[in-house]
Amino acid sequence: MDKNLEAIRRQLEHFGHRDRRFRYPEAFRKQVVRYAREQLPRSSKTQLSKRVGIPWGTIARWIKRSEGRKSDTSLVPVRIAAPEIQKEPPVSMVTPGGWRIEGLSVDQTCRILERLR
């Protein structure tokens, strides 16, 4: 067995049981990425993943990060705009007395017409 692979396997044993919340140390991730880059031309992703003992998706994400690319599952900033309130279109009208009323809502127009009586 390759001495780099042995070192990776030993560290994995040292970490013990790992659940989804477990964070691998940065130095360990770099070590796995180096090993993966060396091995990928000679073996498949599945074989590499089985040998190392880490899911391929995790290794691939570490490789992307090391290249400065963001992961496909990275968070992106989102701006939430206040919903636009659907306003009724403004009213335009001319009263029989010759008053022109424009740009007001129906309610505002009715109030003005009441005052004009």
Image (cartoon, grey):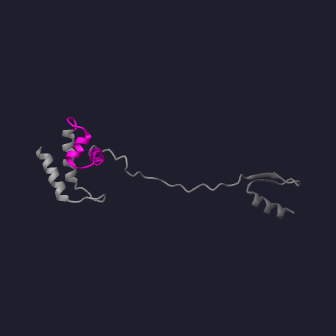
Residue 28 vs 107, above or below: the answer is above
Residue drawn at point x = 27 percent, y = 48 percent: 55
Task: Work out whether residue 51 or residue 5 is closer to the camera in this orientation and state it.
Answer: 51
**Is 74 displayed left or right of 46 in the figure?**
right
Residue drawn at point x = 28 percent, y = 59 percent: 19
Query: Residue 23, image x and y in percent?
Result: 26, 57
**Is 57 displayed left or right of 11 in the figure?**
right
Residue 113 vs 63, above or below: the answer is below
Query: Residue 46, image x and y in percent?
Result: 26, 42
Magenta-highlighted residues: 40-65
Dominant SS of magenta comes to helix
Query: Residue 26, image x and y in percent?
Result: 22, 53
The question of residue 60 being in magenta is answered with yes
**Is 107 displayed left or right of 19 in the figure?**
right
Residue 40 vs 5, above or below: the answer is above
Residue drawn at point x = 58 percent, y = 55 percent: 83
Task: Work out whether residue 64 or residue 8 is closer to the camera in this orientation and state it.
Answer: 8
- Name of the residue lying farthest toward the top: 41
Task: Work out whether residue 10 or residue 38 is closer to the camera in this orientation and state it.
Answer: 10
Query: Residue 74, image x and y in percent?
Result: 37, 50
Tell me how many marks there are.
0
Among the 4 quarters of the image, the one containing residue 10: bottom left
Task: Work out whether residue 46 or residue 111 is closer to the camera in this orientation and state it.
Answer: 46
- Name of the residue lying farthest toward the right: 96
The question of residue 19 being in magenta is answered with no
Q: Give the quadrant of the N terminus.
A: top left
Among the 4 quarters of the image, the one containing residue 117: bottom right
